[in-house]
Image (cartoon, rainbow, N blue to C red):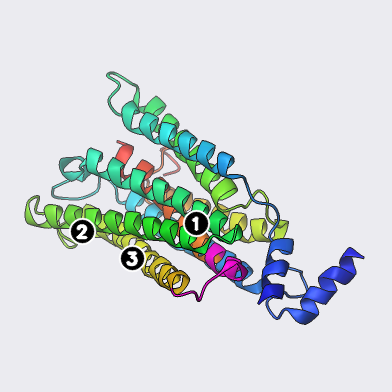
């Protein structure tokens, strides 16, 4: 059991400090507040709201994965095991939206 | 020299393979990768059918953004509690780790109860059920599967907490708690995506 722990620590890479965890939590709180507040900005163009929400959600996503899940400190194999399927998941979403004409990136005559 | 050290671990520890990585942790990352594609399909389906319901109610007739924002904050806070539990276990402070595990599970349970309240409000007061329209079908399936994941995580964390309180979990079981943490953070990042894409984007 002790060997298991030693090996796990040796191969799991470094971890962030408590201070870093608190800083990440503060950043996540600020981003979530901004996300919700952006809904109540009068007259904000739809494209700007959607872009801002996607960027802020993406930042939150990578903060949690990178620091709380320790992926930025972990082995590149672990990183590939998660990031590869993540790209496939994003492609699935974009493909479904394009197939069902829910996605406006394609010209209308193509849809 | 380092190679010899890795080889020695591989010989003595059945959880470390030829790659020098922990099998259990690698298995969890593979599971999370597959779960990413699962939720990607559900989110893609929701977005594909968005605005195509033939009858109401629609998303913005029923969504309670303040309640959902509170739920999002609960899950984010629980992620912080989870890493603090892991840090305490690493410092050999098992009781403190058990406390943080309890807080993580409690925040998760609160999230699930909020979701139960949201679903029953939609069904009983707003007339939105699984079979009402395309929005109801895609919304309940997506958020219901997420809620099931959170419920599973709460049970897992509760078991770890009980083991810690009974003295059957200590710093040597770090990887077990780390793997539970990976799962827990994953349900958090899925909610980050659902919250932005389903609830906030008009």
Residue named by callout 2? B116
Check the residue under mark 3 and report the chain it is in. Answer: B
Q: Quadrant of the N terminus of chain B?
A: bottom right
Q: Is residue B28 magenta?
A: no
Horizontal arrangement in the rendering, residue B9 relative to residue B31 (left or right): right
Residues under numbered marks 2 and 3 in contact, where contact means CB atoms less than 8 Å apart: no
Q: Main secondary structure of the magenta part?
A: helix
Q: Residue A41, position in %: x, y?
A: 30, 21
Horizontal arrangement in the rendering, residue B21 relative to residue B175 (left or right): right
Residue B101 figure quarter? bottom left
The structure residue drawn at horizontal position 56% and vertical position 69%, both measured from the top left corner, is B170
Q: Is residue B170 magenta?
A: yes
Q: Which label's residue is closer to the chain start, 3 or 1?
A: 1
> Does residue B25 appear anywhere in the picture?
yes
To the question of a shared chain for discs 3 and 1, the answer is: yes
Q: Which label's residue is closer to the chain start, 1 or 2?
A: 1
Within-10-Å neighbours for mark 2: few <14, some 14–19, many 20+:
some
Pick the front one: B131 or A34: A34
The structure residue drawn at horizontal position 19% and vertical position 62%, both measured from the top left corner, is B130
Q: Tell me how far mark 3 sits from mark 1, CA to CA.
A: 19 Å
Tell me the magenta residue range.
B166-178
Q: Tell me how far mark 1 sits from mark 2, CA to CA.
A: 27 Å
Check the residue under mark 2 and report the chain it is in. Answer: B
Q: Which label's residue is closer to the chain start, 2 or 3?
A: 2
Within-10-Å neighbours for mark 1: few <14, some 14–19, many 20+:
many
Residue named by callout 3? B151
Q: Residue A48, position in %: x, y?
A: 41, 25
């Amino acid at each position: 059991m002790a060997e298991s722990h030693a090996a796990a620590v040796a191969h799991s890479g470094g971890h962030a400090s408590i201070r870093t965890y608190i800083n990440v939590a503060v950043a996540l709180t600020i981003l979530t507040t901004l996300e919700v507040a952006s809904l109540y900005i009068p007259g904000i163009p739809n494209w700007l709201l959607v872009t801002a929400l996607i960027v802020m959600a993406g930042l939150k996503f990578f903060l949690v994965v990178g620091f709380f899940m320790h992926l930025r400190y972990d082995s590149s194999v672990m990183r590939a095991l998660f990031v590869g399927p993540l790209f496939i998941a994003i492609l699935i979403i974009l493909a479904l939206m394009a197939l069902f004409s829910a996605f406006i990136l394609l010209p209308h005559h193509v849809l | 020299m380092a190679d010899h050290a890795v080889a020695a671990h591989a010989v003595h520890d059945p959880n470390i393979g030829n790659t020098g990585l922990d099998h259990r942790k690698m298995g969890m990352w593979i599971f999370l990768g597959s779960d990413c594609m699962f939720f990607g399909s559900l989110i893609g389906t929701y977005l594909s059918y968005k605005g195509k319901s033939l009858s109401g109610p629609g998303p913005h007739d029923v969504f309670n953004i303040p309640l959902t924002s509170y739920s999002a904050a609960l899950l984010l806070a629980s992620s912080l509690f989870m890493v603090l539990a892991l840090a305490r276990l690493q410092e050999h402070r098992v009781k403190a780790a058990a406390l943080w595990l309890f807080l993580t599970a409690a925040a998760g349970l609160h999230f699930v109860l909020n979701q139960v309240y949201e679903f029953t409000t939609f069904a009983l007061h707003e007339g939105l059920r699984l079979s009402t329209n395309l929005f109801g079908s895609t919304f309940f399936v997506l958020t219901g599967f997420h809620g099931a994941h959170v419920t599973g995580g709460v049970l897992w964390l509760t078991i770890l907490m009980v083991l810690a309180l009974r003295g059957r979990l200590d710093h040597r079981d770090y990887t077990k708690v780390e793997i539970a943490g990976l799962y827990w953070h994953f349900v958090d990042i899925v909610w980050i995506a659902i919250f932005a894409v389903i609830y906030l984007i008009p």
